[in-house]
Image (cartoon, rainbow, N blue to C red):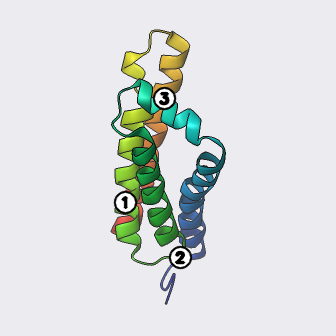
Amino acid sequence: MFYEGHTTLEIVGQLMVATLFLGTLAINATTKVKQHADRMAAMNIPMPYATLWAGFALQAVGGVMVAIDWHTDIGAAILILFTILASAIFHRFWTMDDPLRRHLHLSFVFSNIAVIGALLLLISH
């Protein structure tokens, strides 16, 4: 059934990836909605609240699918899409004048590239 044919390390790794998405979703959807929507509005993202909640939905659906090992390849693909979109919206390092902020957001992009790599490994399993 779920996690059939997975090693213990694969299960732990898969749950850790899911925890990243579900944990940040819990924080952002409960304490950061206005902050994120305001940032999106300042960047002229259309319908910032609707766009933000659509992103939360992608994050929730993909995260749960990966966590429970149900159509993990589809869940991971959803999370890849979410990660690319979130990075493009929130980590625009190339627009930042402050070197420290630019470096911080570039580091977030590199971390997200590694997360996408982990998701690709889940898809290939």
Of 93 and 39, nearer the camera is 39
Q: Total number of numbered labels?
A: 3
Q: Which residue is mark 1?
A: 78
Res. 87 image quadrant: top left
Question: In the rendered view, would you say 56 is above or below 36?
Answer: below
Res. 124 image quadrant: bottom left
Of 22 and 41, nearer the camera is 41
Q: Which residue is mark 3?
A: 39
Asked whether the beta carbons under mark 2 and mark 1 sit within 8 Å of each other, the answer is no
Left or right of 34? Residue 117 is left
Amino acid found under the numbered disc labelled 1: Ile
Residue 32 position within the rendered picture, expressed as x and y whole percent measured from the top left = 61, 40
Asked whether the beta carbons under mark 3 and mark 2 sit within 8 Å of each other, the answer is no
The Cα atoms of the two marked residues, 3 and 1, are separated by 23 Å
| Front disc: 3 or 1 | 3
Res. 72 image quadrant: bottom left
* Comes first in the chain, label 3 or label 1: 3
Residue drawn at (45%, 59%) of the image: 57
* Comes first in the chain, label 3 or label 2: 3
Residue closest to the far bottom: 1
Dot 1 falls on a residue whose secondary structure is helix
Residue drawn at (37%, 60%) of the image: 78
Residue 25 position within the rendered picture, expressed as x and y whole percent measured from the top left = 57, 53
Q: Which residue is mark 2?
A: 68
| Front disc: 3 or 2 | 3
Amino acid found under the numbered disc labelled 2: Ile
Crowd around label 2: few <14 · some 14–19 · many ≥20 (10 Å): some
Position of the C terminus, as image quadrant, is bottom left
Q: Is residue 125 visible?
A: no
Dot 2 falls on a residue whose secondary structure is loop
Crowd around label 3: few <14 · some 14–19 · many ≥20 (10 Å): some
